[in-house]
Each structure stands twice: as C-alpha cells, then as structure tokens.
Amino acid sequence: MELKGLKINFIGDSITQGVGTSAEDKIYLNLLKNEYGLAEARNYGISATRIAEKRKKHDYDTHDYLDFCSRYGKMDDDADVVVVFGGTNDFGHGDAPMGNKNDRTPMTFYGACHTLFRGLLEKFSDSTIVIMTPLHRTNEDNPGGDTKKKENTATLIEYVNVIKEVAAYYSIPVLDLWSVSGIQPNVDVIREKYCPDGLHPNDAGHKLIASRLAGFLKSL
C-alpha cells in the first residue's frame, strides 16, 4: 500500500489521543502523516474509553457512554484506511464480561469486537480496516485489571487473543503490537525509555508504534 495521499481514521483511547506525548505532532498517527505524506490523519482517540459498553454507567462520567461501538459510526466516511487501537481499558477498568465467540452485542468483549469489526466493514466497505492489539503494560497479569472487578477475571493477553480471534473471523489484518512493538514496561530499561508510567508510551514509544504501523500498512 502506498501511504502518500491516504486519508486514515484512527479510533482509540488515551494512547491515540496522545496522553504521554509532549506535543500533538509526536502522536504516532501525526508522525505517520508527516513522514509519509498522508492527506489526513484523523484522531478519534478519547481517553479512558473501551471497545465494549460499560454496564454500570455514571451520568457524571461521559467516558462511560463513549465506547468504540457507540461512536465508530460518527467517523468521516471517506477514509481510505481505518485503524482501531483499543482493548487495554476493557482490561483495565471495563465491567463487560468476556463472553464467548457467539456473542454479537457490545455488552460483552467478544460481542463488542464482533459489533465493531463487522460495523466497520459495512460502513467502510471500500476501505482497508486494520486492528492494532494492546501494548504490554505493567499490571498485565492481574486478572482484576486496575480495579477490584469480580466478573472480568482475565489477564490482558486474553483480551489480545480475543481481538486477534475475532479479527481473523472477518479476515481483518492485525498488527500485533503485543508481540512486535518493542515496548515492554515490565523491563525497567524499556519502561524508562519508552513508557515511563507503565501504560502510556512517550514520544519515543510513539515513534516505535508509527514505525511498526507504517511498515505494516506498506505490506498490505
């Protein structure tokens, strides 16, 4: 795929929004735009949002109503490529159960992945859809995520595997950042260099993501 001149929509969470970077032009999607001459790099990243719906919503927290499934339909229609980068918050503080591969509603993580991926294929039928898996994070092996969840007792790799499984069902290309990003904050020297807070990549981390994504897109 030739990147120059493409219009790309990016839907994601705080990492896509740019939390952890020093400036907007350091966010991975803007690095991609500036280096490869994208026509548009539209940022639909919203901090603290999840792929799946939250079951227990609070009126004081607008993020509870902004899951990916509820907002992908509002993205601009003319994208050549759509990149999805989420799942770490479903692990971290989502309360949707994991569910199973037969689910088709956004109230479970399996169902939300099906809802989102199928919906993108239908809305952007002439576009290339790409899924990026979550990155490693410091508490990735804690089944409770960032909270004391009682129903979502899954580690982050289980969320990664569901994303890959559902994407494979729809034959959607997956950039497995879990495996190839070069970012593993459980290694002290890597955390200091690329992901100081253990979750959000810094400028150097975003540069790695942009490099991996560029190579992946060019291979399609």
Image (cartoon, rainbow, N blue to C red):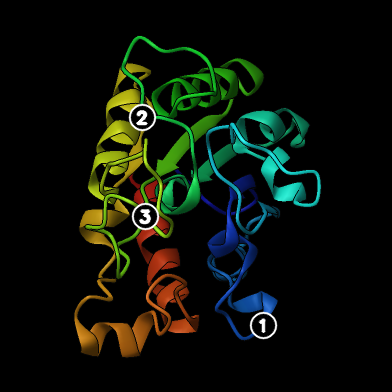
Residue 163, x across and y down, in percent: 35, 34
Please give left or right for residue 56 compared with residue 61 in the image.
Answer: left
Picture quadrant of residue 67: top right
Tell me which label, 1 or 3, sits earlier in the chain.
Answer: 1
Secondary-structure class at tag 1: loop
Residue that appears at 22% across and 57% down:
141
Q: Quadrant of the C terminus?
A: top left
Residue that mark 1 sits on? 23
As displayed, is residue 21 above or below residue 105?
below
Q: Is residue 36 visible?
A: no
The answer to whether the residues at label 3 and label 2 have Cβ atoms under 8 Å apart is no
State which tag comes first along the sequence, 3 or 2.
2
Q: Position of residue 64 (x, y in %)?
A: 68, 43
State the separation of the CA atoms marked 3 and 2: 13 Å
Residue 137: quadrant of the picture: bottom left
Residue occupied by mark 2 = 98
Q: Amino acid at mark 2?
A: Met
Name the kind of residue labelled 3 in the image: Gly
Q: In front: 4, or 33?
A: 33
Whole-angstrom CA distance, mark 1 to mark 3, is 28 Å
Residue located 59% across and 36% down the image: 54
Residue 6: numbered disc: none
Q: Nearer the viewer, mark 1 or mark 2?
A: 2
Give the residue at mark 3.
145
Look at the numbered disc 3 and give the secondary structure of its residue. loop
Please tell me which residue is depicted at 61% across the width and 86% down the height of the picture.
22
Q: CA distance from mark 1 to mark 2?
A: 35 Å
Looking at the picture, which amino acid does disc 1 mark?
Ala
